[in-house]
Image (cartoon, rainbow, N blue to C red):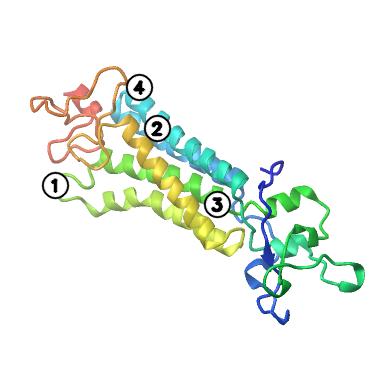
Amino acid sequence: MDRVSPPFERRFAVYQDTQRTVVNTDLAYPEREWILSSIVVGCLAVFLPLGVFTTAQWWLRSFWDWDAAVLGHLHSVLLATLIQVVLKVLVGGLRPSFLDVCEPNLNASISAPEGNGFRDIMYTTTICTETDKTSMRNAMTSFPSGHSAAGLAASVYLFLWLNAKLKVWANRRTEIWRVTVTAMPILLACINCGLLTVDRMHHWYDIVGGALIGIATAFASYRAVYAAVWDWRYNHVFLDGVNSFDYENRDANYAHGTLTEKGGWTTAKRREDS
């Protein structure tokens, strides 16, 4: 992303008033490092769910179930990443620390560029004195948040998988611990998004935009590899990619392949032992 800047010129206000006495505080936060770097978030988004899927094989005992879970998860994260990168390149946005990076030249005595718009209070990047192109590009690619897009793509996908395998919202009353475990990925995603408001690397709408992308790709990817998203009867059943799933077959037994042995459900491990 540091090599590509949005193709369209974005105008911004240095001051919030026409008298030019109040600085635009939305863009005036100090530049700082990420609390959670892109590498950390990316590794967590990829490897944490993979660890859960792999550990669950002690009970599921199905390579193809693992294969479906992993492929769907990777598709969710990669698709969310692709969408947010394209939007960053084509749309972009000014980060909250943009003015600190830009260091605008407003001194008329040294040939500062003239403003435009109402009372000439709007400027372009020609007013910036920062010469580091990489820093400037990064400061202009705030929308959408890649952190929230990747985080929600992984967390929501894992949430849907846990709900299906633990049968949290199914045909029986669920223990609180199951609800809690299933909600943990959402908590981690909220922490990730919340920290972006602390380090001020994104505006709130950047975070929300990235989150919506991640949620959408998670639902789309989960449904692409499993028979349902919310239908508790077979949202744990993976699709094999060759044969069509028969939703009308009332004689089929889909009770196995879960991570619970209550309510008529069973794990592959228990089925082997019996």
Nearer mark to the viewer, of 4 and 2: 2
Task: Write down the residue under mark 2.
Answer: 72
Nearer mark to the viewer, of 3 and 2: 3
Q: Position of residue 43 (x, y in %)?
A: 55, 40
Q: Identify which amino acid the numbered label 3 is placed on.
A: Ser
State if disc 2 and disc 1 touch (CB < 8 Å): no
Nearer mark to the viewer, of 4 and 3: 3
Upstream in sequence: badge 1 or badge 3: 3
Q: In this view, does 268 lie to the left or right of 22?
A: left
Instruction: Give the label on residue 63, or none.
Output: 4
Instruction: Give the label on residue 248, or none.
Output: none
Instruction: Give the label on residue 172, or none.
Output: 1
Q: How far apart are marks 1 and 3 (CA)?
A: 38 Å
Q: Identify which amino acid the numbered label 2 is placed on.
A: Gly
Callout 1 secondary element: loop
Residue at point 55% right, 47% down?
146
Question: Measured along the vertical axis of the image, is residue 60 above or below residue 146?
Answer: above
Crowding near the residue tagged with mark 1, few <14, some 14–19, many ≥20 C-alpha atoms within 10 Å:
few
Question: Measured along the vertical axis of the image, is residue 247 above or below residue 188?
Answer: above
Upstream in sequence: badge 1 or badge 2: 2
Q: Distance between the residues labelled 3 and 2?
A: 22 Å
Q: Identify which amino acid the numbered label 1 is placed on.
A: Arg
**Closer-to-camera residue (32/268):** 32
Callout 2 secondary element: helix
Question: Measured along the vertical axis of the image, is residue 112 above or below residue 8?
Answer: below
**Closer-to-camera residue (254/153):** 153
Task: Write down the residue under mark 3.
Answer: 145
